[in-house]
Amino acid sequence: MNRMRNALLSIAIVWFAMPTLAADNVTTVPVRFDKGASSATLKGSFRGYDTVHYTLAARAGQTMTVSVAGSSNANFNVYAPGDAPGTSAALGSNADRKWTGRLPTSGTYTVQVYQMRASARRGEQVSYSITIAIR
């Protein structure tokens, strides 16, 4: 009887712990432009619900352009300083895989790269390149 109870207890622990084992990974990548450059192109990949956050400093009044290439599952959102995915509205997102906007404030901006829930749920791999320009 004890063996049966221990086996059931072990199964219950594993079953309820599974969601925490499959936690989303968020990778943060600081963006740095080469000397004299006003843009950078970076390559990356992720799977499922994982996301990549590109961070870069910019000043109010500058224009940011973000474009993504590669997997059609690669999507992005742009967040103003102090704003974050899941807690704030995005300043911009990928309509036609590109966004350009005038920046409202100075500080560190975040460009979140992710995939939609349907493909994330299937655990699809997303390979992409992203270009971020500040003018």
Image (cartoon, rainbow, N blue to C red):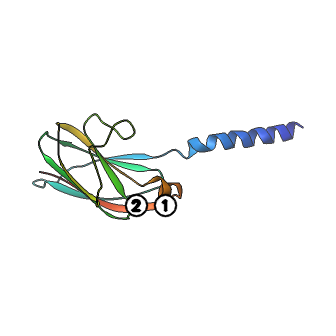
SS under mark 1: loop
Q: Viewer-proximal residue, 52 or 32?
A: 52
x, y percent for residue 30: 27, 46
- For the point 25% across and 39% down, the residue is 80
x, y percent for residue 5: 83, 37
N-term-proximal mark, 2 vs 1 = 2
- For the point 9% across and 54% down, the residue is 36
Mark 1 burial class by Cα count in 10 Å: few <14, some 14-19, many 20+: some
Q: Is residue 34 above or below residue 87?
A: below
Q: Residue 53 vs residue 99: left or right?
A: right
Q: Name the residue tied to disc 1.
A: 124
Amino acid found under the numbered disc labelled 1: Glu
SS under mark 2: loop
Q: Name the residue tied to disc 2.
A: 73
Residues at marks 2 and 1 touching, judged by CB atoms closer than 8 Å: yes
Q: Is residue 49 above or below residue 71?
A: above
- For the point 17% across and 39% down, the residue is 104
Amino acid found under the numbered disc labelled 2: Asn
